[in-house]
Image (spheres, rainbow, N blue to C red):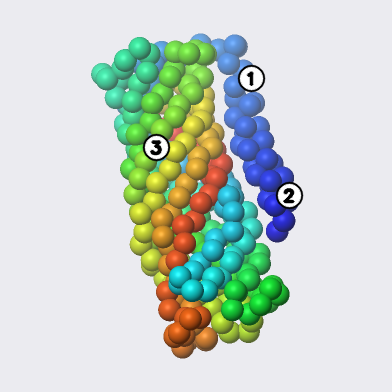
Amino acid sequence: MSTGIHNKLLSFGVAAAISIGAPALAVAADKTFPTPEEVKSWYVSVFGGANFHTGDVDYTNGITTVNTEFDAGFTFGGALGYKWHNLEVAGLIPRTELEFNYSKNSADAINFSGNGPGQEVVASGSGASAVGILGSVYVDAPKIFGHGITPYIGAGAGVNIVNHNLIYNGGLNLNDDGDTVFAWHVTGGISYAVNSRVSLFTDVGFHQAVNTSSIRRNGAVTLAGAGGGSFEDDINSVVVKAGISVGF
């Protein structure tokens, strides 16, 4: 996938996420909205969206490199959160959240530095997936716009449990199940309060899974030497999502 196509997909994903929230925001002037104090403190949320790797993943063992280009992928998940109304300062309300998510991207192209400049033949089904567990802190600003519209920004950290399955040239592969790595994100978005319990939201974030690793094999046999062993790199993604939260 070329850089131009990647950028177009990213732009489309951002526009799609914004368009999901736009109909709800458009009716903001026609109803009565709960005050920030009336909004429930505890909430659960569910979401879905897309994730776009910001560049190729250069898995390397320090000698050779398996350059991997991923297609745009998907993500979905849920969260349990709490809004700290008693800690409000200058109209800003902090909240904490524990999020669980799943994401998956298919491999579009692979180039192994040991095989010359030619692109490898990628097997169908090659890709990477991850289960994420993140603790985050957000700051809501419900009084900036009013009318139930709340911009927010936040950051968090946790772990990603990454599964790699990258197969090319008829049997060579990078494969590892359950590689647990440190992960973090920064995210900004906007929510719309339907009432004191229900809100719609959409946001965009930068996510990084640090130093993910896979073992290079030929079939089931682990390779040794300059072209074998463990290959590692960070995975950087832009995540665009939309969802609904329900207070209790």
- Per the image, label 3 sits on a secondary structure element best described as strand
Q: Looking at the picture, tell me which residue is in the foreground, 127 or 148.
A: 127
Using the rendered image of the protein, determine whether residue 44 is visible from the camera's viewpoint: no
Q: Earlier in the sequence, mark 3 or mark 1?
A: 1
Amino acid type at image mark 2: Gly
- Per the image, label 1 sits on a secondary structure element best described as helix
Q: Earlier in the sequence, mark 2 or mark 3?
A: 2
- Residue lying at 43% horizontally and 19% vertically, measured from the top left: 141
Badge 1 density bin: few <14, some 14–19, many ≥20, Cα 10 Å = few
| Position of residue 180 in the picture relative to residue 186 (left or right) | left
Amino acid type at image mark 1: Ala
**C-alpha distance separating marks 2 and 1:** 32 Å
How many numbered badges does the structure rendering display?
3
The residue wearing badge 1 is 26
**C-alpha distance separating marks 3 and 1:** 28 Å
Q: Nearest to the eye among marks 2 and 1: give it.
A: 2
| Position of residue 178 in the picture relative to residue 10 (left or right) | left
Please provide percent x and percent y for residue 174. Answer: 51, 75
